Amino acid sequence: MGHQNPGFDASNLTIGQANTLYRYDWLAVIGQNALEWFGQLLLIALGKVALVLYISQRRQAEYLWIFAVGALTLLQLPIRVIFRFQNIPMAGEVAAEMLRIFHPYLWVSLYFSFVRHRIDWRWRIFLGFTGIALVLSGLQGSILTPSVTIQMLESIHYVGLLSIVIPIVLLKHLRRGNPEAGILLTPVILLSLYIYAEIALGTMFQIPAWRSIAIQGFNLSERFPAGPFSISLDDVSGILSTLSLAIIMLLRSSTMSHRQAQLEDELAAAQEVQKVLVPEHRGIIPGFTIESVYEPAQQVGGDFFQILPAGDGGLVIVVGDVAGNRLPAAMLVSVLVGAICGLSEYTPDPAELLVGLNERLVGRSGGAFSTALAAHIAADGRVKVANAGHLSPYLDGKEVDLPGALPLGVAAGARYETTQFRIEPGSRLTFYSDGVVEA
């Protein structure tokens, strides 16, 4: 998380050849900082992955915060590595410290975004003040007069955020049933224990009788030896924090893949249902030649049509388009097709058909609506057409002029006007949906 505390180390006088001492110091620096650098590289890599996920999932703002933290780490890492091996100009050191102003806001926003905890203007002011205080604390001893007391006072807000506020917020949301808060809570608690230990050891160090015990405690928490490497609890908590974020991202990806598989199964089932609902015409009505094409833009669509024989030797045609697409629209199509088949047995009149369909949809479609056009074509060529917000048909290449009306499902009690005309033998009457116009 970028939490830093001063460590204590006893200086030793080492005698030997200059190149040997240089190589020893170089290896010692790597051993002491390897875990920290590994954790930062891991966070940078995770930030890149998070950016890719955010591009495809814009609603997951937490991925953007992970990327922001990784980008900030990438900006700071080169200066930190170089500083371990050689002196750098004060301007570079100051620039690295100035970047710490963003730490409180980015880390708090990251954790709060995972639990959907809102950051209002008061939080922003507090985090901005905390970032400024953290920078001033880091500049102690470089361009500001060093003072342990002032340094502690300036960093106390950030320490409080890491060790008190964030653990409480995560614990509260864990109790509310958010499993991701539980995953994030483990490294946060470890970091909090590390901070509490540092504060306790720092207090003990101020007491001469306990100073040696405090130094031993600092060496254990800051530079626990593990072969050629030194392990710091701060670095361990940082790596665990990055791993917890990675685990959440993996679990989300697994859950999304499972849901996607379920959705594809549902879409396949809906597609099979829609194939059954869309009629296949084979010239079964004497006196009429019927041709139809149905090509959904996706697996399933909201367009529908029905062509049914009428009792007077003619036929009834209903075409329409449900607002929306994919599964909800396809399910509403099944409702409409069933209603069309039922209503056509009682009346072939287009206006009455649309009134019946409208009553079926009003209050039952969850706010969805559908355009529709109904026509009754008698055996002698007489045509009656009623329109509910759909596109007008074409007769021999010329658009039929129809009055407009509200789509189905918008308002109860809607009435639809009937238009009559005649088609001659050999004429072509074409019905279509807006998908044809868009194509």
Image (tube, rainbow, N blue to C red):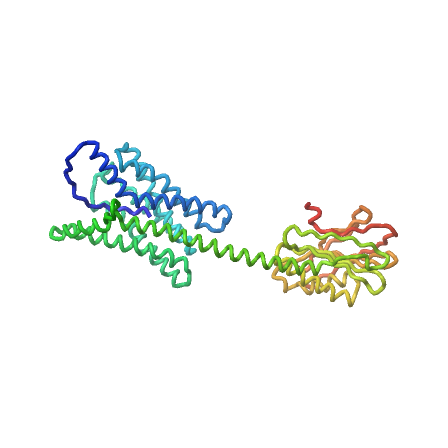
Residue 56 in the image: state x and y as whole percent. 51, 47
Quick one: which residue is furthest to the left in this view? 209
Q: Is residue 154 visible?
A: no
Q: What is the quadrant of the C terminus in the image?
A: top right
Q: How many marks?
A: 0
Q: Position of residue 323 (x, y in %)?
A: 65, 55
Residue at 26% from the left image edge and 48% from the top image edge: 231
Query: What residue appears at the point 80 percent right and 63 percent down from the top-left corner?
Result: 348
Left or right: 127 as drawn, with respect to 255: left
* Residue 339 drawn above or below residue 102: below
Residue 384's image quarter? Answer: bottom right
Q: Is residue 368 left or right of residue 136?
A: right
Q: Compared to 413, does 295 lie above or below?
A: above
**Along the line of sight, the residue nearer the viewer: 285 or 355:** 285
Name the residue located 68 percent from the left edge and 46 percent from the top edge: 438
Q: Quadrant of residue 29?
A: top left
Q: Nearer the viewer, residue 278 or 370?
A: 278
Q: Residue at x 64, y 61 (%)?
A: 331
Say if residue 407 shows up in the picture. Answer: yes
Q: Position of residue 160 (x, y in %)?
A: 29, 53
Instruction: Judge from the rendering whether residue 169 lies leftward or rightward of residue 358; answer left or right.
Output: left
